[in-house]
Image (spheres, grey):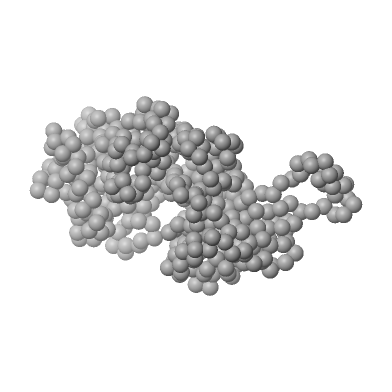
């Protein structure tokens, strides 16, 4: 087993390579709405030994067992043995630490997570710092150096996603000016309202970072200085990791400046070209998407440059600092490997997790139509109202308009392609729902054909002709 680490902006990111060549990495997730179930169990260790102190039994054992069961499902070792590897990495990274604490945190389907608290080295006895520490303790003064909290995020599958996470963090960190701090598990309504306000402003702040190009933040940013121009590469067609011997083009290359309409029409053409080579092309889907893209452009939904979106701005990827009974600051953002530059309607999606639950008609993170539903409780209504009060007019429009919601669903297929019957059904549903929303657009479908040349010409190109 080999261990490598990257320390960036006080966030520990690392890789653990097991015997089966599975790539893992090492970050503290933000608890969800039911924070009581996410209280971590802590195993204390000493810097001069690799023997972990036994964990005390607690009411959280049931939750830990459930988490361990999910780890077994993913084919990974349980935390009882995994924490030794986390400690080994931490002790190598912080060899002078006086103590290290390993905290177990709830992970997700894509990542394992653990927390590390590193105490500063103890000064030598009778040295000046030793006397200073004794005096500070005697007079109850704050210590000259406090323990530091680090986050370990361990991708369960894709090793390259870790590198993209670090690449994005490197070029975006200086623009967003955040630091990684700890999290308190218990929040009252006023604190949640403060978080709602902070999240709303954070989305706008991230979207304010723009690019003339659409695509993913590429690995080339790893060799760039922080704050330099962000390098972007086109979305992959076919998807990353797939190699088709009969497809002559690379799946991605450096992105060039273009307007959102030209980008969306180009994505339709790229997927059509790939599918035609494969011998099975759903022309009616791409023709319908091209027509909807032009309709979005004509209605003003594709104005401006491409905006940055995090891609997974959910509670478990946010770190906060509780400042008081009514004040909570967002101090860190995790998991940047999904960050992309996309049309604005993608960047300004409403943070539905603040006021919607999965039992409100489906998964609130997937079924956006629920954004316009009236929340069922006073608490959730207040949180949604905070969003409306803080969001700009543009942000509110993109968050709640049915056109923007359909555009977001359409974009996901333009980005990922159609590789399953579920994706085909979703694409057909998007076309049908747009027809019902704007029947005057006469969007072509499975039984209707327009001239493809007309569909894939942008307005600018038509004027040039």
Direction right: furthest residue? 126
Image position of 309 (left or right of 93): left
Establish if 259 lies above or below 419. Answer: above
Image position of 339 (left or right of 92): left
Residue 227 position by quadrant: top right
- Residue 366 position, x and y percent, is 32, 48
Residue 366 seen in this snapshot: no
Q: Quadrant of the N terminus?
A: bottom right
- Residue 399 position, x and y percent, is 34, 35
Q: Residue at x 54, y 60 (%)?
A: 59
- Residue 2 position, x and y percent, is 60, 67
Q: Residue at x 54, y 48 (%)?
A: 185
- Residue 212 position, x and y percent, is 40, 36
Q: Looking at the picture, tell me which residue is in the foreground, 176 or 457.
A: 176
Q: Quadrant of the C terminus?
A: top left
Q: Looking at the picture, tell me which residue is in the foreground, 231 or 148.
A: 148
Q: Residue at x 40, y 33 (%)?
A: 382
Direction bottom: furthest residue? 19
Q: Looking at the picture, tell me which residue is in the foreground, 437 or 36.
A: 36
Residue 291 position by quadrant: top left
Residue 46 seen in this snapshot: yes
Q: Residue at x 74, y 57 (%)?
A: 98
Q: Looking at the picture, tell me which residue is in the foreground, 458 or 385.
A: 385
Image position of 155 (left or right of 97): left
Q: How many marks?
A: 0
Residue 50 position by quadrant: bottom right
């Amino acid at each position: 087993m080999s261990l490598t680490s990257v320390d960036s902006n006080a966030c520990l990111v690392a890789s653990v390579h097991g015997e089966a060549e599975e790539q893992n990495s090492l970050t503290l997730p933000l608890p969800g709405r039911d924070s009581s179930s996410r209280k971590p169990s802590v195993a204390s260790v000493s810097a001069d030994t690799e023997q972990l102190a036994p964990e005390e039994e607690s009411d959280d054992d049931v939750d830990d067992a459930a988490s361990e069961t999910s780890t077994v499902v993913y084919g990974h070792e349980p935390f009882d043995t995994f924490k030794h590897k986390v400690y080994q990495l931490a002790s190598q990274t912080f060899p002078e630490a006086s103590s290290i604490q390993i905290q177990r945190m709830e992970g997700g389907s894509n990542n394992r997570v653990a927390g590390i608290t590193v105490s500063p080295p103890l000064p030598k006895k009778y040295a000046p710092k030793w006397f200073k520490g004794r005096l500070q303790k005697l007079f109850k003064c704050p210590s000259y150096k406090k323990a530091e909290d680090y986050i370990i995020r361990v991708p369960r599958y894709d090793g390259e996603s870790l590198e993209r996470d670090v690449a994005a963090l490197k070029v975006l960190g200086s623009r967003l000016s955040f630091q990684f701090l700890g999290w308190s598990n218990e929040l009252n309504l006023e604190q949640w309202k403060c978080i709602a306000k902070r999240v709303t402003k954070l989305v706008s702040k991230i979207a304010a970072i723009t690019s003339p190009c659409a695509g993913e933040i590429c690995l080339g940013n790893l060799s760039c200085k922080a704050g330099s121009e962000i390098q972007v590469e086109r979305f992959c067609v076919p998807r990353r990791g797939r190699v088709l011997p009969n497809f002559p083009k690379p799946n991605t290359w450096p992105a060039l400046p273009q307007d959102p309409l030209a980008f969306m029409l180009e994505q339709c053409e790229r997927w059509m070209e790939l599918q035609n080579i494969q011998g099975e092309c759903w022309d009616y889907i791409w023709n319908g998407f091209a027509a909807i893209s032009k309709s979005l452009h004509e209605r003003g939904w594709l104005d401006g440059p491409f905006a940055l979106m995090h891609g997974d701005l959910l509670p478990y990827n946010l770190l906060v600092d509780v400042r008081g009974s009514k004040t909570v600051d967002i101090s860190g953002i995790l998991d940047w490997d999904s960050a992309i530059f996309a049309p604005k309607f993608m960047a300004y999606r409403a943070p539905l997790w603040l006021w919607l639950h999965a039992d409100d008609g489906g998964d609130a993170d997937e079924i956006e139509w629920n954004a316009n539903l009236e929340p069922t409780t006073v608490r959730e209504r207040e949180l949604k109202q905070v969003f409306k009060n803080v969001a700009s007019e543009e942000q509110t429009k993109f968050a709640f308009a049915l056109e923007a919601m359909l555009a977001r669903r359409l974009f996901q297929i333009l980005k990922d392609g159609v590789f399953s019957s579920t994706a085909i059904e979703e694409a057909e549903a998007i076309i049908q729902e747009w027809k019902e929303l704007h029947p005057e657009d006469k969007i072509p479908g499975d039984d209707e054909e327009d001239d493809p040349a007309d569909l894939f010409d942008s307005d600018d190109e038509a004027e040039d002709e």
